[in-house]
Image (cartoon, helix red, strand yellow):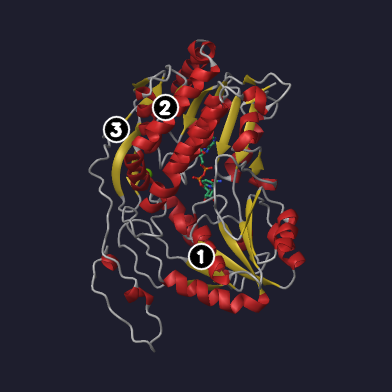
Amino acid sequence: MSQHTDTTYKPTSPNSKLDFASVWEYAPAPESASHAEIKEKYDLFIGGKFVKPAEGNYFKSMNPATGETITEFAEASKSDVNKAVKAARKAFEGEWSSISAKERGKYLYRIARMIQERAREFSVLESMDGGKPIRESRDVDVPLVAAHFFYYAGWADKLEYAFPGKKPKPLGVCGQIIPWNFPLLMLAWKIAPALACGNTVVLKPAETTSLTALKFAELVKDAGLPDGVVNIVTGAGETGAEIVNHKDIDKIAFTGSTGVGKLIQRSLAGTDKKFTLELGGKGAMIVFEDAPIDQAVEGIINAIFFNQGHVCCAGSRLLVQEGVAEKVIQKLKDRMESLIVGDPLDKNTDVGAINSQAQFETINKYLEIGLNEGADVYQSSCSIPDNGYFVRPTLLMNVSQSNRVVQEEIFGPVLTIQTFRTADEAIQKANNTPYGLAGGVWTDKGSKIFKVGSGLRSGVVWANTYNKFDPTSPFGGYKESGVGREGGMHGLGAYLKF
Ligand code: NAI
Ligand code: MG
């Protein structure tokens, strides 16, 4: 990448304006991909075996940082989905139900340890197929994946303690549909609690990022999990709809867009399938005048620019108290200049590639909408690679509450900025979108944290930090951000009947 090739250090004179581009020039530090095995083609994983799709169709997956095709995935049709559900039912009624809860837990521990052993390969493949910086897949995604399996492994034989006085029982076959922003982590969020509770699963990864799910299928085979407990079918929305509408599925777990979530909820109306939906967000970050400003700026950068803003709970709106607005915005602009946008496999990269052409177009469409709505658009001056899909970190200022860019999910490295005077005004503005997934507050006063925390209608509120995850903590939304909770003990309840 051109911006990384100049390795000479260029000192700036003490009186010159800080020239971040030269101060922070790093030599390229690409993570090696030579140890990561990618097959030319991947089949469906059904009943413990890789099987060809009935209709023989495959589709391409590309590396969004280069635009090159890296592999092909099978397209699962109705009959393939049916086969996967049958395999899952057979396992549920057979071997999986006959083993003890303690043994079930052991499988999950084994999977967790094997993920740790193969962490490097999973991280590299996640970054290649999806575009996220290796620093994130290596330090956030994959460790959290292992942590989820460890956490739910521990619950497998203790379900009666989680729900005292009740006799929890598994639901049966669970259909799980996941998005492309945290491919392996969303798989772990879905599969770990489902298996811990004694269910079997048919999971469909997103069509642009199915690689690590199929690598996970290989791991499941190596772990000796009974055939049919985990089935992975690849394909796009039609395959997802086949899962949703299959008569022999007991629960649907979905993470993705609010639009598709609503479709799914409509399809499920009148059936006795259980469901959890984790949908979009428009997280507000509220920065008070008494906040530790540098810490807040770093938190904001992390909340919206890392992982290209491809985070459902991203902090995509900044609400800053008037007295410090100018200072915060200047510091944000300075920090944005030091962000490195480029090769996801480079360990120095902060902002990787946008996941797909479609998402790239969506983000650019919103930048245009913002301009037309009268926003002041500020972008960092960094260079971006010539190939692949990249968007510079962007601020949209002078926006108002009714603007589409303030109300709608952009899902890119784009932050809107508004100001407020009082805590009540901040809460009112933060709550004034159709979403309610996450929010953040920065202040020196505990009392303000409690006031804002209890005033925000959102599933998660972080204080003086943002985007911190832990398997013990439940996650989910208010309003159009979804139904139900995943993670923690709450996440167990979603996979059990009493
Ligand atoms: P999407 O909601 O279409 O895709 C998510 C998953 O649902 C994928 O596996 C997809 O194949 C599947 N799917 C699509 N249509 C389906 C249907 N009718 N029935 C069952 N499954 C179906 O999301 P998309 O189009 O990739 O992204 C569009 C927007 O959604 C983004 O711009 C972003 O705003 C939002 N989004 C939110 C996510 C979140 O974590 N809450 C994740 C991904 C996208
Ligand atoms: Mg891909």
Please provide percent x and percent y for residue 299: 53, 62
Kind of residue sitting beneath label 2 = Arg
Q: Tell me which label, 2 or 1, sits earlier in the chain.
A: 2
The residue that appears at 38% across and 53% down in the rendered structure is 135
Q: Quadrant of the C terminus?
A: top right
Distance from the alpha carbon under mark 2 to that under mark 3: 27 Å
Residue sitting at the far bottom = 15
Distance from the alpha carbon under mark 1 to that under mark 3: 41 Å
Q: Which class describes the residues within 10 Å of circle 2: few (<14), some (14-19), or many (20+)?
A: many
Q: Is mark 3 within 8 Å of ligand 2?
A: no
Question: For the residue labelled by badge 1, is the local secondary structure a helix, a strand or a loop?
Answer: helix
Q: Where is mark 1, residue-wise?
A: 298
Q: Tell me which label, 1 or 3, sits earlier in the chain.
A: 3
The residue that appears at 42% across and 27% down in the rendered structure is 110
The mark found on residue 41 in the picture is: 3
Kind of residue sitting beneath label 3 = Lys
Report the front residue among 325 and 380. 325
The mark found on residue 110 in the picture is: 2
The residue that appears at 62% across and 41% down in the rendered structure is 474
Q: Which class describes the residues within 10 Å of circle 3: few (<14), some (14-19), or many (20+)?
A: some
Question: For the residue labelled by badge 2, is the local secondary structure a helix, a strand or a loop?
Answer: helix
Q: Is residue 495 visible?
A: yes
